[in-house]
Image (cartoon, rainbow, N blue to C red):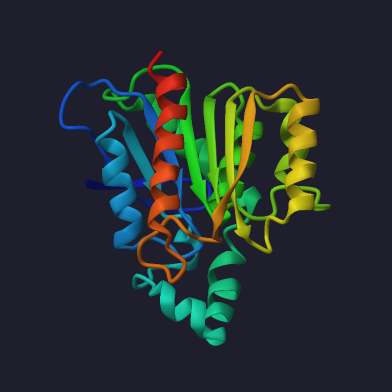
Amino acid sequence: MSSITITTRDGRCPSYVFRPAAGAPWPAVLVYMDGLGIRPAMLELGERLATYGYYVLLPDLFYRSGPYEPMDPRAVFSDPEKRKVLMEKFFALATPAHIMSDTAAFLAHLAAEPSVRPGGIGTTGYCMGGLMSLTAAGTYPDRIVATASYHGGRLATDAPDSPHRLAPQIKSRVYVAGAIEDQSFPDDMKRRLEEALSAAGVDHRIETYPAKHGWVFRDTPVYDAAAAERHWQTMVALFDATLKH
């Protein structure tokens, strides 16, 4: 792992890069973090993804809020005051419009990196990052060829910036995995997203895992080992099929 800083339109974004042991140039994957920020469990995901043969870029999407200590997900889940700070200090500035502006800089970094194979990239995202991953697919359709979203919320709402509204622009293959217990991605929202992607002719698959929102990361109280491994299998299969062939 190496730490870099990417200059965006709004400032300097601390980011983390993970490279395979050998075989450059590699296809690239941009990871949109979850709503609990950069912490050891998030960095571990980048490290593991690189072992499958991918150059992985993991930006800190909370950089606009200033430096912060790694968050304790269990404390955030259990303490309403900590959740309030998370929403008001961090989420308020990590809007889709801001993150899509940042994504232009992330893509420019990948395009200029000699160890990245030229061509389309993949994205994956978790929680709020799942929304960003899907939004990026419709915002930068000529750059993104594979899109994954895990326990992403608000993927098909009445909001003007809801990701499902971008379906007609999406050219990538899309994989979305929700959870049975997830108020931010209920069955009616799943149907709405399915209808939008189908109507637009997007190559996609939407699944619901028997888990709770946030199941991927080992440091959360809702971590589900079986569902987390299924996430790895589906994500690597998506990227191998689209980025390595």
Q: Judge whether 131 appears above or below 52 on screen.
A: below
Q: How many marks?
A: 0
- Near-viewer residue (104 or 46): 46
- Near-viewer residue (75 or 181): 181
In which quarter of the view is residue 232 placed? top left
Residue 38 falls left or right of residue 94: left
Residue 167, given in percent of the width and then of the height, sits at 73, 32
Residue 124, given in percent of the width and then of the height, sits at 48, 41
In which quarter of the view is residue 225 placed? bottom left
**Image point (76%, 28%), residue name:** 198
Q: Judge whether 96 appears above or below 181 on screen.
A: above
- Near-viewer residue (101 or 40): 40
Residue 131, given in percent of the width and then of the height, sits at 61, 48
Q: Which residue lies furthest to the right in this view?
A: 158
**Image point (44%, 20%), residue name:** 241
Residue 13, given in percent of the width and then of the height, sits at 41, 52
Q: Judge whether 100 appears above or below 60 on screen.
A: above
**Image point (64%, 41%), residue name:** 135
**Image point (38%, 68%), residue name:** 67
Residue 54 falls left or right of residue 86: left
Q: Judge whether 136 appears above or below 129 on screen.
A: above
The quarter of the image holding the C terminus is: top left
Q: Which residue lies furthest to the top in this view?
A: 245
